[in-house]
Amino acid sequence: MDYRGQVDSSCTVMAPQGILLPPSPHPDEDRPNKASSRSLLRGFIRKTRARLVVGTLASMLNAALTWATPWPMKILVDSVFGAKRLPTFLAFSGSRVELLYLVAATMVIFALLGGAATFVSALSFANAGQVFSNDLQVEVFDHIISQPPRFFDQRKSGDLTTRLIADVQAIQRALVESLPTLVNSTLTILGIMVILALLGPIFLGAVAVLGVFIALDLNYFMKKVKAQARRARNMEGLANSSAQQAIMGLVVVQTNQGETAESTRFSRFVNASTGHSLKANVSQASMSASVTTVLNIAIALFVLMAGVAVFNHTMSVGMILVVSSYARSIYKPLQQLTKRAGIVGVGLAAKERVSELLASDESLASAHVAPSHWTRRGAVEYQRVRFAYGGSEVIHGADLVIEAGSRVGLVGATGSGKSTLAKMLPRLLEPSEGTVRIDGIDTRDIPLQILRSFVAYLPQETFVFAGTLWENIVYGMAGATRIDAVTAAREAGLVEVFHQMPNGFDTVVTEKGTSLSGGQRQCVAIARAVARHAKIIVLDEPTIGIDPALEGVLNQAFERLTQGKTTIVVSHQRATLHFCERIYEVRNGVVSESSMGGFFDATPTESAQVAESFRVR
Ligand SMILES: Nc1ncnc2c1ncn2[C@@H]1O[C@H](COP(=O)(O)OP(=O)(O)O)[C@@H](O)[C@H]1O
Ligand SMILES: [Mg+2]
């Protein structure tokens, strides 16, 4: 887990203005492509189709009930209290009191049906949102975790976790809280507008004008809310990154008195995020206010128009009730819609951020089955390998051949490219040109999973997870037990080291393994490699910064671990290299067999002894 951004935390502390600044001054510029956003929507519909259909049907019933609601009242006014005859299809032979009971009964039935429909639609849509975002979250996590290290070079881990957790939650909230309202309200409003237009040509024009105005208004402010929410989200991601980095580099922050700088940076992002959210609130309030005002004026106009029609005897008194009730029925769902615009805006912005993340995929192409002629002996060959970070090439055509089962050391100045070469073997990095072969087979033709169980890679800094020591040793090995862990430690000759810990193999280590010394963490890494029975071992500066007390034990363990295995050891420590049969030097981006001079912290006479000890045995 040697991601540069994390490793170099000391640099960011010293240059608080630099590394964590927003990548783009206009967060709008990093807009996702529309296609991926659409595919997220398509996925939602595909995965929750049944629930959406049920929810929509219930919503339609609900809307139909809203459309029907004013009519019993109209009958009450016109035909129970007034003298108007019932329409023929409602021919009723009973008395007026009986008619009153019938009207009341109808209203009760409407209320019961409405309650049931509301329950079904709210539940279906809410569950659809919940189930979808649950799957989405797992999908995003799997996506992130399958990316190669270079993906993380360009992204901030805090922003990734914001997308994974907060953005998915925002999508869920928008779906769960607004989808039932959205569908219900839209159906109700559209239906009422159609009915009003049918009731009289005078309403048609008014409804058309009102509809167009509301659509434009909602569209205009929704766009603003969404853009502002997106900016707020981006800033939140940066705030998260900044906090994460400060916490990870806490020792450096505190010992260099970086608290003020960290606090300033963090609050800058938080303030920027809040600033954008406040602007989004203004847009949302403006939307709410403008829609409400216009609607209220429209209601007055509708009632006025209906009143004129009653005076002209082209409409009954009961119809005023119907018209004003409809106008009010438009009002309520619209108000609910505008109230949720904020949640929807944030949800849409979050959807774009998640889509963008899912669309950017750098995961490695890999074969599905291993070539049948693969001997699995473990011979390694680098052929004319070139590699560039960004635009700058650091490996300029390196060749290296290691016979199966032989152990070689890799030396070279800091920054010469040793780790870069080492990481190519388990495909943590891919050569930009040339090939890395195992037993003559291009590593790209070996399924990634098989390759990585074939090659054990031990970085300088081993990552240890929160949990017991034995769980850490068999990390990633499905079905492995405590016994497997102890056996591996015994094979590596490290049982004593683990037994010395407070609870032996059951000792619980803290997050990132901070309760272990560097040497103890390295012991875990060695046991891990042994447990996997890898054929090829890559050790990248495994004893740098190791406590002297453990160094001897570790070097012995390395020797046992690599016995009979193809091994690359990157190191400057002669004790670590003593079992290597050949030493190669990385210089100017190429590899050559080393004379070993100058790489060991030894006196000239010692160097001679070292040279002696490196003779092929
Ligand atoms: N993730 C990275 N992004 C950009 N440059 C990098 C990255 N990792 C390493 N480099 C650069 O590539 C060169 C070789 O790095 P590395 O292989 O780690 O050297 P070594 O292990 O020999 O010390 C160095 O100049 C280093 O600064
Ligand atoms: Mg290195």
Image (spheres, rainbow, N blue to C red):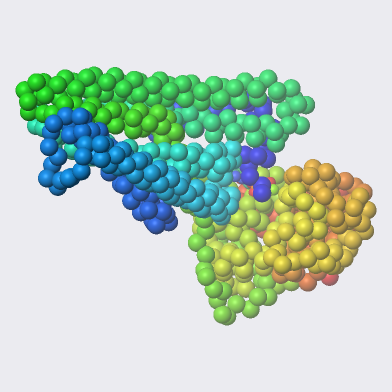
- Position of the C terminus, as image quadrant, is bottom right
Query: Residue 438: x and y, percent?
Result: 62, 69
Is residue 192 visible in the rendered image? The answer is no
Q: Which residue lies furthest to the bottom in this view?
A: 373
Of residues 22 and 37, the one nearer the viewer is 37
Is the residue 541 above or below the residue 280 in the image?
below
Q: In which quarter of the image is residue 312?
A: top left
At 56% across and 80% down in the image, what residue appears? 372
Of residues 17 and 248, the one nearer the viewer is 248
Image side of residue 144 versus residue 596, left or right: left
Is the residue 345 above or below the residue 52 in the image?
above
Is the residue 39 above or below the residue 315 in the image?
below
At 70% across and 72% down in the image, what residue appears? 404
Of residues 350 and 363, the one nearer the viewer is 350
Image side of residue 432 versus residue 186, left or right: right
Q: How many labels does the image show?
A: 0
Query: Residue 34: x and y, percent?
Result: 35, 44
At 88% across and 60% down in the image, what residue appears? 494
